Amino acid sequence: MTNKANSIFKQSIQDYHQFDCVDHPLQNPYSAGSLDALLYHKNWIDAVQWHLEDIIRNPNIDPVEALKLKRRIDASNQERTDMVEYLDSYFLDFYKDVKTEKDTPLNTETPAWAFDRLSILQLKIYHMEQEVIRTDVDESHILKCREKLDVLLQQEIDLSVAIEQLLNDFAAGKKKMKVYKQMKMYNDPNLNPVLYGEKEKKD
């Protein structure tokens, strides 16, 4: 499954960079509701956020624009989390008939969060590859980036193998899946004291 995921992530990254614009609309080539479509959408969110994070670090950015970007990044983070939870719902359903024992061990992360790491890793690889082929920097920069790229490529292999092992353990009932929904308090007007404090002032 990781071979397919890596291929889809790379496709999404290539598609994004045809436009290289954080405002370009998602055009998902896969059937709605399919795992492929979910993986493509997940990486597209990550690609857009990657570039938003670049933009906001411009030292000459207008403070008002920076605040707008910060709020957009916050919204993107929430969308990313929602997509991970949606993916985990897919995996929960996929493994729902697998029999496990009461003492079957859990894993420290769910499959979707593991694929989240793989998605981000593909973005790191793509952008480090771009650094390696730059022509406006000295050889020292290229060599340092080449070394970093080699590490990232090894990490791609290792993480892919680890995810495959995890999925095989789930399929064989050697590990059981348990999902806890993210309870981000700062986005909730009823849980963030700054937000509900403002609401109480108005009331």
Image (tube, grey):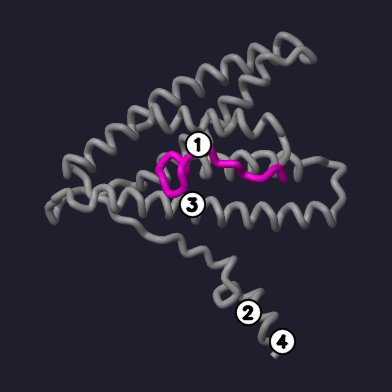
- Work out whether residue 40 or residue 126 is closer to the camera in this orientation and state it: 40
Sort mark 4 into few (<14), some (14-19) or many (20+) by Cα contacts within 10 Å.
few
Quarter of image, res 170: top left
Q: Are marks 4 and 2 in contact (CB under 8 Å)?
A: no
The dot on residue 83 is 3
State the CA–CA distance, disc 1 to disc 4: 42 Å
Which of the marked residues, 4 or 2, is nearer the chain's N terminus? Answer: 2
Q: Position of residue 35 (x, y in %)?
A: 40, 43
Identify residue for label 2. Answer: 196
State the CA–CA distance, disc 4 to disc 3: 34 Å
Which of the marked residues, 2 or 3, is nearer the chain's N terminus? Answer: 3
Relative to 176, does residue 191 appear above or below in the rendering? below
Q: Position of residue 162 (x, y in %)?
A: 33, 32
Which of the marked residues, 2 or 1, is nearer the chain's N terminus? Answer: 1
Q: Main secondary structure of the magenta part?
A: loop
Identify residue for label 4. Answer: 201
- In the rendered structure, which segment of residues is drawn in magenta? 22-38
Depth-wise, is mark 1 or mark 4 nearer the camera?
A: 1
Look at 63% across and 26% down and name the residue there: 127
The answer, for residue 64, to whether it is visible in the render is yes
Relative to 154, does residue 61 appear above or below in the rendering? below
Depth-wise, is mark 2 or mark 3 nearer the camera?
A: 3
Sort mark 3 into few (<14), some (14-19) or many (20+) by Cα contacts within 10 Å.
many
Viewport quadrant of the C terminus:
bottom right
Identify residue for label 1. Answer: 119
Q: Which element type, helix, strand or loop, lies under badge 4?
A: helix
* Label total for image: 4
Look at 46% across and 43% down and name the residue there: 31
- Residue type at mark 1: give it: Ser
